[in-house]
């Protein structure tokens, strides 16, 4: 059981590390692209009490 918990923790840590590193790389190239990719993650912004993301057709 502790091995499973450690594996899940490592998996989540690797997932968040990959997400933030990819966001940093996207931000260095295009701030609009990283804003759209972050704004599409609605559960993350729901924790921060942001408004829900609009559909892409309304944005364009």
Image (spheres, helix red, strand yellow):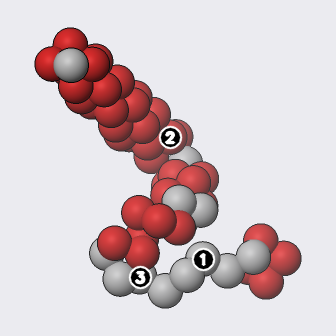
Is 22 situated left or right of 59 in this image?
A: left
- Compared with 47, 9 (above or below) is above
Question: From the image, which quarter does the N terminus lie in?
Answer: top left
Reading the image, the residue beneath label 1 is 53
Q: Which mark is residue 50?
A: 3
Are there few (<14), some (14-19), or many (20+) residues within 10 Å of tag 1? some
Depth-wise, is mark 1 or mark 2 nearer the camera? 1
SS under mark 1: loop
Report the residue at 53% width, 60% height from top: 41
Report the residue at 33% width, 32% height from top: 12
User: Residue pushed farthest left?
Assistant: 2
**In this view of the protein, which residue sits in the foreground, 3 or 42?**
3
Report the residue at 27% width, 19% height from top: 4
Q: Earlier in the sequence, mark 1 or mark 2?
A: 2
Residue 35 coordinates in the image, percent (x, y): 51, 61
**In this view of the protein, which residue sits in the foreground, 17 or 24?**
17
Is 22 situated left or right of 55 in this image?
A: left
**In this view of the protein, which residue sits in the foreground, 45 or 38?**
45
Reading the image, the residue beneath label 2 is 26
Report the residue at 35% width, 83% height from top: 49
Is the Cβ of the residue at disc 1 closer than 8 Å to that at disc 2? no
SS under mark 3: loop
Is 50 situated left or right of 3 in this image?
A: right
The answer to whether any part of residue 14 appears in the image is no
Are there few (<14), some (14-19), or many (20+) residues within 10 Å of tag 3? few
Answer with the quarter of the image where residue 17 lies. top left
SS under mark 2: helix
């Amino acid at each position: 059981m502790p091995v499973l918990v450690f594996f899940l923790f490592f998996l989540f840590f690797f997932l968040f590390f990959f997400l933030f590193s990819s966001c940093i790389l996207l931000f260095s190239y295009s701030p609009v692209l990283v804003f759209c990719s972050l704004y599409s993650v609605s559960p993350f912004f729901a924790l921060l009490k942001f408004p829900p993301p609009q559909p892409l057709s309304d944005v364009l």
